[in-house]
Amino acid sequence: MKAIFEYRMKVRDYECDAQGHVNNANYQHYFEVTRHEFLEQVGLNFYQLHLEGIDAVVARVDIRYKIPLIGMDEFLCTVTRIERQNVKFIFHQEIIRLKDNALCAKAKIEVVNLVNGKLSKPEVFDEAFKDYI
């Protein structure tokens, strides 16, 4: 499936565990950085939204680890699609190692939105994601 957004990154040595693999928790960082960069592409700034009382927060993460990344691997972290279910946005994401196009991890990340601390459906996200949902 062609991605709707791609962000290129490189594994840093300190992200690896004793086995030489990227520690599992770092995959969440990669996915989050990519979502924030995607927001920038569609004209939204995560911090500015917060200042306006709009917070997108992760409610659930499901990551399937396929092949480990290791130190200095270059990879693409992608958003392959976005779904909307009531107040949730579901981001489908993948990490692809560049040297061989291997799928390293797949994620389904559910995000809910709080407006001034209350669960809400902010129109700003509907408008920004209209071409992708």
Image (cartoon, helix red, strand yellow):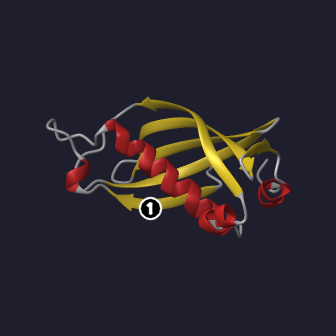
Residue at horizontal 66 percent and vertical 50 percent from the top: 56
In the rendered image, the quadrant that contains the N terminus is top right
Q: Could you tell me if residue 33 is visible in this image?
A: yes
Residue placed most toward the observer, 25 or 81? 25
Residue placed most toward the observer, 25 or 82? 25
In the shown orientation, is residue 111 left or right of residue 76? right
Q: Quadrant of residue 86?
A: top right
Residue 45 is situated, as x and y percent measured from the top left of the image, at 64, 68
Taking 6 as reference, is 100 above or below it? above
Residue placed most toward the observer, 35 or 72? 35
Tag count = 1
Residue 91 is situated, as x and y percent measured from the top left of the image, at 64, 42
In the shown orientation, is residue 61 left or right of residue 50? left
Residue at horizontal 81 percent and vertical 57 percent from the top: 131
What residue is disc 1 on?
8
Residue at horizontal 82 percent and vertical 46 percent from the top: 121
Q: Amino acid at mark 1?
A: Arg
Q: Quadrant of residue 109?
A: top right
Residue 81 is situated, as x and y percent measured from the top left of the image, at 68, 45
Residue 16 is situated, as x and y percent measured from the top left of the image, at 22, 45
Residue ranking furthest to the left: 18
Q: Could you tell me if residue 1 is visible in this image?
A: no
Callout 1: SS: strand
